[in-house]
């Protein structure tokens, strides 16, 4: 991480104070005193690299607490690694402090990031800090190891495969609504699911062993199933009646006048950071629920109560 000021003052002093402790003493980070890092090699493993960004007012609500932004930034990147069957070990950070984002806010961001880096066993190897007139934004590049040749790609689904999803779906979309005050969330469960998603790193060995294709559910389950269909050159059919839902999501669903459209809302809302994957017929993917199948052809087929629904875009799109 580097900047225009003399060592010991300004940006360099802040990097030393806020971010050097987050390196975990990794030799290749050089205490963040250099303009580059060295990533060690691991014989028998491939290096998996992913990158995601968060922009205030787009990916997180305006005025979101800095520590929450930092933790979501890390976790969405680790979710990508989880979907590849990779074990995370390091990251690079670029952050743009907006005007008015003072020392307390910057310290909170670093503190939240450090808490999660330690929890997930990840070291910060470098990056950059800049200032901006706004809004706040940050980008993180995450690195992970996977046994050579065993990264789980989006391509690989075959006709006859079963479509699976981990955990529960819809809490992310409802959590954002709860943060906005649009959905009742007395115990804070939904807001927490949106703000601090849990990357499914616990599934990486199962994915490497049993999944034929996989992606994380970030844009929306329907959209991310569509990514698998497009990469694999197949048609993916989803049965919304089979979606695994949390008790909070079921309570919300029971209060909706149009059940089919409500299920579609949960399946397209995004921010769940679960894993959608395909596997061979006859195999069970532990920790996952079967929600559809892979067919010959192309595109998506979304079904509910035996009827096909129009999923629209299927989820979040920037452009």
Image: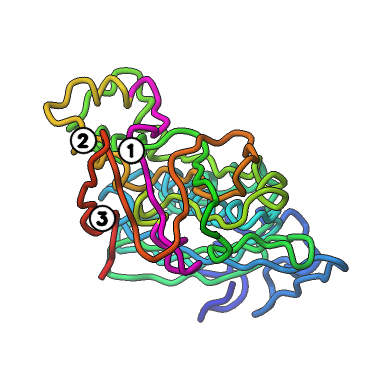
| Earlier residue among tags 1 and 2 | 1
Tell me the element at label 1: helix
**Residue 278 appears left or right of 265:** right
* Residue 212: image location, x then y, percent: 61, 56
Instruction: Give the Cα separation between the discs numbered 3 and 2.
Output: 30 Å
| Earlier residue among tags 1 and 3 | 3
Of residues 26 and 179, the one drawn nearer to the viewer in this rendering = 179
Point out the image quarter for the C terminus: bottom left
Q: Nearer the viewer, mark 3 or mark 2?
A: 2
| Earlier residue among tags 3 and 2 | 3
Kindly identify which residue carries mark 2: 260
Kindly identify which residue carries mark 3: 57
Of residues 251 and 87, the one drawn nearer to the viewer in this rendering = 251
C-beta proximity under 8 Å, tags 1 and 3: no
Residue beneath the point at 73% across and 53% down: 24
Q: How is the image coloured?
A: rainbow
**Residue 312 appears left or right of 236:** left
Instruction: Give the Cα separation between the discs numbered 1 and 2.
Output: 8 Å
- Label 1 neighbourhood size at 10 Å, few (<14), some (14-19), many (20+)? many
């Amino acid at each position: 991480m580097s900047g225009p000021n003399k060592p010991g003052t300004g940006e360099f002093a802040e990097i030393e104070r806020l971010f050097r402790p987050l390196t975990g003493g990794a030799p290749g980070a050089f205490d963040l005193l250099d303009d580059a890092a060295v990533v060690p090699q691991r014989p028998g493993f491939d290096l998996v690299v992913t990158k995601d960004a968060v922009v205030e007012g787009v990916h997180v609500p305006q005025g979101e607490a800095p520590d929450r932004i930092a933790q979501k930034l890390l976790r969405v990147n680790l979710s990508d690694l989880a979907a590849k069957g990779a074990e995370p070990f390091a990251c690079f950070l670029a952050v743009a402090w907006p005007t008015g984002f003072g020392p307390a806010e910057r310290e909170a961001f670093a503190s939240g990031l450090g808490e999660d880096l330690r929890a997930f066993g990840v070291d910060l190897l470098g990056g950059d800090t800049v200032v901006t007139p706004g809004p706040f934004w940050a980008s993180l590049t995450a690195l992970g190891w996977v046994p050579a040749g065993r990264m789980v790609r989006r391509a690989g689904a075959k006709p006859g495969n079963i479509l699976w999803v981990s955990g529960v779906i819809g809490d992310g979309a409802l959590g954002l609504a709860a943060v906005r005050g649009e959905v009742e969330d007395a115990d804070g469960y939904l807001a927490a699911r949106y703000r601090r998603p849990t990357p499914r790193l616990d599934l990486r060995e199962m994915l490497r062993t049993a999944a034929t294709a996989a992606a994380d559910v970030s844009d929306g389950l329907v959209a991310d199933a569509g990514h698998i269909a497009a990469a694999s050159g197949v048609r993916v059919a989803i049965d919304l009646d089979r979606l695994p839902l949390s008790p909070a999501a079921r309570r919300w669903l029971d209060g909706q006048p149009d059940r089919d459209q409500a299920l579609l809302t949960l399946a397209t809302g995004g921010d769940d950071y679960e894993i959608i994957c395909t596997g061979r017929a006859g195999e069970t993917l532990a920790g996952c629920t079967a929600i559809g199948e892979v067919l010959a052809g192309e595109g998506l087929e979304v079904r509910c109560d035996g009827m096909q629904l129009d999923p629209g875009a299927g989820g979040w799109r920037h452009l």
